[in-house]
Amino acid sequence: MDKLKAIVFWGACWGVLEATLGWLMHLIHFKGEVLLLYPFGLLCMMMAFKQTGQVSATVKVAGVAALIKLSNLLIVPTVPVFHVTNPAVAIFLEGCATWAFCFVVRKRPAFLKSVVSAAVLLMLASILLFRGWQLVMDAYVAYNPALHAPVDSRLFLLWGWRAVVQGLMLAGVYYLVQFFPMNIRFSKWTNWLAIPFLCFAVLLNGLI
């Protein structure tokens, strides 16, 4: 139960940031929000991994944050579908990439010639999968005008640049958290605050 509460707590923390800073950057049409939001989400995933000792905690935290975002479909049914589903899917895919990286580095380090290269490739895979999701959503569920801009080499350069930056973040935070002292009793706080933070995150996502 303590491990579950830790996952809920860190996922809710990520959900709160997505509802506040994510909403603000969307409001001002800031295009690099992922590079500001991802490090915090990555820290939440890695802290849950550190606290529980479970690699799967990373993707579970992302799942909690994604579900918090998806709650908007029930709370505010008038919001455009892709405004909710796209961020939720992006969060979950980032969680999957983080889980894969942690699993390989922790369990099979001999298979990796370059930790950074593995991180960059996994982040690029998550970006391409997300693009595929957007195209499917646009074709079958909800028209997204942002997808119909001309595709040129700059788009591929953007994806590559994002993958490199996020990959460096992934590798860096993974090793940084390994040295983070755990003599602070995080479980004391996560046990008490998990459910209140979850409710707060859902409510905040519905109001903003």
Image (cartoon, grey):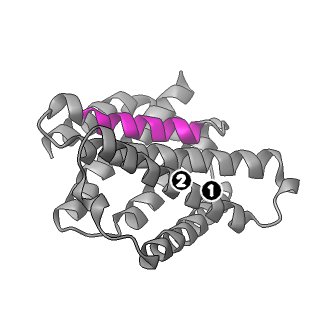
In the rendered image, residue 52, in percent from the top left (x then y), is placed at 62, 36
**To which quarter of the image does residue 82 belong?**
top left
- Element type where label 2 sits in the image: helix
Viewer-closest of 180 and 148: 148
- Element type where label 1 sits in the image: helix
Q: Is residue 15 visible?
A: no
Q: Is residue 66 magenta?
A: yes
Q: Is residue 144 above or below residue 68?
A: below
> Is most of the magenta stretch helix, strand or loop?
helix
Residue count near mark 2 (Cα–Cα under 10 Å), binned few <14, some 14–19, many ≥20:
many
> Which range is magenta?
57-71
In the rendered image, residue 114, in percent from the top left (x then y), is placed at 78, 67
Q: Residue at x 33, y 71 (%)?
A: 150
Viewer-closest of 94 and 128: 128
Residue count near mark 1 (Cα–Cα under 10 Å), binned few <14, some 14–19, many ≥20:
many
Q: Is residue 15 left or right of residue 123?
A: left
In the rendered image, residue 195, in percent from the top left (x then y), is placed at 35, 28
- Pointer 2 residue: 126
| Badge 1 vs badge 2, beta-carbon distance below 8 Å | yes
Q: Give, as a three-letter code, the residue at label 2.
A: Ser
Q: Residue at x 56, y 66 (%)?
A: 169
Viewer-closest of 39 and 83: 83
Q: Is residue 159 above or below residue 100?
A: below
Q: Give, as a three-letter code, the residue at label 1.
A: Leu
**To which quarter of the image does residue 72 belong?**
top left
- Pointer 1 residue: 122
Q: Is residue 23 left or right of residue 184?
A: left
In the rendered image, residue 51, in percent from the top left (x then y), is placed at 60, 40
Q: Residue at x 52, y 35 (%)?
A: 60
Give the number of marks.
2
